[in-house]
Amino acid sequence: MKLNIGIIGMGFMGRAHSNAWSQLNKFFDTDVEICLKAVACRDKARGEAFAKKWGYESVETDWRAMIARDDIDVVDILTPTYAHKEMAVEAMKAGKHVICEKPCALTWQECHEMAEVAKETGVVTYLNHNYRRVPAVALAKQMIEEGRLGTIYHYCGKYMQEWIMDENFPLTWHLQKEAAGAGPLYDLGSHNVDLARYLVGEPTAVQASLRTIVKERPEASAGAATFSAGESTEGNAKKPVTVDDAAFLILDFENGAIGSMDTSRFAAGRKNFNCFEIYGSKGALCFNLERMNELQYYDMTNDVDHQGYRPILVTEGSHPYVGAWWPQGHIIGYEHTFVHAFYDFVEAVRTGGKMTPDFEDGEKITKVLQAAQISDAEGRKVRIDELK
Ligand SMILES: NC(=O)c1ccc[n+]([C@@H]2O[C@H](COP(=O)([O-])OP(=O)(O)OC[C@H]3O[C@@H](n4cnc5c(N)ncnc54)[C@H](O)[C@@H]3O)[C@@H](O)[C@H]2O)c1
């Protein structure tokens, strides 16, 4: 079976996804042959340079024209959040399988519409919460399912970054509500909620505090959708930041666990500090993306003299996804998680199976995040089922 891929967007995720599509057939055994067919972008010259570098056959300057093409099987949406719903709905209605970057969409209602169209059309959809497919995270899931943690009491998630602490960092799309929906609450918190739902269960209520620390910022230089390191914003007019800079959440879970999720873009020294601690009656697991080949495990069933956290180096061929890569101890990185996800996605397309997380998951995740916004605005604990 051959799958022709068309991507929309050529930024950070444009590169990460193109790399993963190129690696898939080289490392994973599958009967699906991947063909990099088209790039949809707004600037033809940039699109052609990108297509040449990554090996795409063609360029479209109108994403609708790319979706309408008969020779596209999968539409991979890599644009800012505001565009996700419109592009995904149009692609699904055209019968294409769809991959969409997180966060799913601006509101849970938009996510709901995406989920409904996915059901009606029967195409395979995938919302790219790639951290589920870090081998150490997939191993954590296996260990929880094996009962090694017993009853889970707590999920403590944290996703910290520092990249906008300079108050002259420009007002990119990430800092505008109409483009991004929210700040780290959506950007980082969506990953956090996805991991919590995957590993622990469904959140039922949330209490939150959100803060915007730098309230206005210089506009990005003309045409700069994304800030490039070193770009000056001196003299540019300042405009209000309309999203949170930090969001701290406390959560109740359906299974009785309680937990927390902290997200911030003002956490000095934290580059991409995505971590969780899960505490259960028989032990605990801790993960930190900045040390992503390790999973810390505390086994309470060991005798007390020999307890203590120990790192499991998750590089054995028997660990999830690892067998496709290198011999034991030869570590992997961020980019591999996208290859793992795309392998599972193409296998779902090949077998007519389901891929997770999908847009229905996106709706559930976004409800938790919007409940956090309501909680902050109204100063109260908000049940997720209030959002209907
Ligand atoms: N899974 C992850 O680890 C991860 C990491 C970073 C970003 N993301 C998500 O990926 C998405 C894109 O983020 P990014 O960092 O790549 O952004 P980016 O700003 O680097 O790139 C966005 C791209 O989309 C293009 N674009 C914007 N509007 C468009 C339109 N209407 N038609 C065609 N192209 C359009 C821009 O020109 C640019 O090429 C966001 O939803 C973001 O949250 C996911």
Image (cartoon, grey):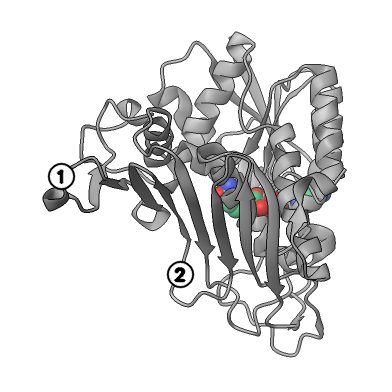
Quadrant assignment, res 113 = top right
Q: Residues within 10 Å of mark 1 (few under 14, many from 20)?
A: few
Q: Secondary structure at mark 2?
A: loop
Look at 72% across and 41% down and name the residue there. 364
Which badge, 1 or 2, is on the more N-terminal residue?
Answer: 2
Depicted 326 relative to depicted 106: above or below: above
Look at 55% across and 37% down and name the residue there. 198
Query: Disc 1 residue type?
Result: Asp
Residues under labels 1 and 2: Cα distance?
A: 36 Å
Q: Residues within 10 Å of mark 2 (few under 14, many from 20)?
A: some
The mark lying in front, picked from 1 and 2, is 1
Look at 41% across and 16% down and name the residue there. 29
Query: From this viewpoint, is residue 63 visible?
Result: no
Q: Secondary structure at mark 1?
A: loop
Residue 136 at x, y percent in the picture: 37, 41
Residue at image mark 1? 303
Residue 112 at x, y percent in the picture: 83, 36
Residue at image mark 2? 270
Quadrant location of the N terminus in the rendered image = top right
Work out which residue is located at the far left of the displayed protein and give it: 305
Side of 84 where 25 appears, left or right: left
Depicted 66 relative to depicted 119: above or below: below
Residue 137 at x, y percent in the picture: 42, 41
Label 1–label 2 contact, CB within 8 A: no
Side of 307 where 362 appears, left or right: right
Query: From this viewpoint, is residue 60 visible?
Result: yes
Depicted 23 relative to depicted 368: above or below: above
Quadrant location of the C terminus in the rendered image = top right
Residue 315 at x, y percent in the picture: 27, 37
